[in-house]
C-alpha cells in the first residue's frame, strides 16, 4: 500500500471521528442521547447526503444543508427544530474541537460530516 494512501486514510478516519465527536456532543446536549457510535455513523451519512446534492448549481449548498439536518432528524429523536438546534451545536462543537486539536497537535485537520467545519 502506498504511503500517501495510508496518510489519506488516517486523515479521513481522524476527521470522521472528530465529526462524530461534534455530533455526539450536540446529541448529548440537545437530545440526551449518549451513543458515540451512532454519532460517527450519522456524520458519515450526513457527509454522503451533503455530497450527493451539494454539486447542484446555485441552490446545492442550501439543499445539502437541509439534507444534513434531515439526517440528524432521522437519526435522533425530535423534530426539525431539534435537528436544526443540534446542527448548530454540532457545528460549534466541531469548531471548538478543531481549534484545540489543531492548536495542540499543529495539524490542519477538518471535521468530516459537519458542514463548514
Image: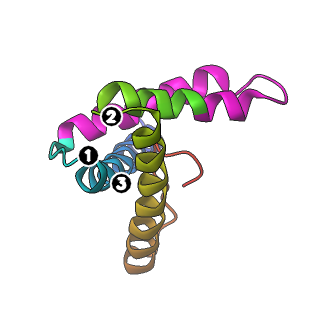
The span from disc 1 to disc 2 (Cα, nearest Å) is 8 Å
Residue 104 seen in this snapshot: yes
Q: Position of residue 10 (x, y in %)?
A: 36, 46
- Residue 68 at x, y percent in the picture: 51, 32
Mark closest to the chain's N terminus, 3 or 1: 3
Which SS type dominates the magenta stretch? helix
Say which residue label 3 marks.
Answer: 22
The reply, left or right, for residue 23 in relation to residue 46 is: left
| CA distance for labels 3 and 1 | 14 Å
Give the residue at x 70% y 34%: 62
Label 2's element?
loop
Say if the magenta span includes residue 102.
Answer: no
Q: Residue drawn 49% across and 53% down?
A: 88
- Circle 1 SS class: loop
Badge 1 local density, few (<14 within 10 Å), some, or many (20+)? some
Q: Which residue is mark 2?
A: 78
Range of residues picked out in magenta? 37-65
Residue 114's tag is none
CA neighbours of label 2 inside 10 A, class few (<14), some (14 to 19), many (20+): few
Whether pointer 1 and pointer 2 mark residues with C-beta atoms closer than 8 Å, the reply is yes
Residue 31, numbered label: 1
Tell me the mark number nearer the camera, choosing from 3 and 1: 1
Earlier sequence position, callout 1 versus callout 2: 1
Q: Is residue 1 above or below residue 32?
A: above
Asked whether 47 or 86 is in front, the reply is: 86
Residue at position x 34%, y 33% from top? 42
In this orientation, which residue lies closer to the viewer: 21 or 16?
Answer: 21
Amino acid at each position: 500500500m502506498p504511503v500517501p494512501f495510508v496518510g489519506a486514510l488516517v486523515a479521513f478516519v481522524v476527521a470522521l471521528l472528530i465529526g462524530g465527536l461534534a455530533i455526539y456532543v450536540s446529541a448529548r446536549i440537545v437530545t440526551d442521547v449518549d451513543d458515540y457510535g451512532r454519532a460517527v455513523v450519522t456524520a458519515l451519512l450526513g457527509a454522503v447526503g451533503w455530497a450527493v446534492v451539494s454539486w447542484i448549481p446555485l441552490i446545492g449548498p442550501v439543499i445539502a444543508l437541509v439534507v444534513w439536518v434531515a439526517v440528524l432528524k432521522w437519526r435522533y429523536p425530535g423534530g426539525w427544530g431539534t435537528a436544526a438546534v443540534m446542527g448548530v451545536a454540532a457545528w460549534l462543537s466541531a469548531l471548538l474541537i478543531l481549534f484545540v486539536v489543531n492548536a495542540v497537535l499543529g495539524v490542519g485537520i477538518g471535521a468530516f460530516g459537519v458542514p463548514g467545519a
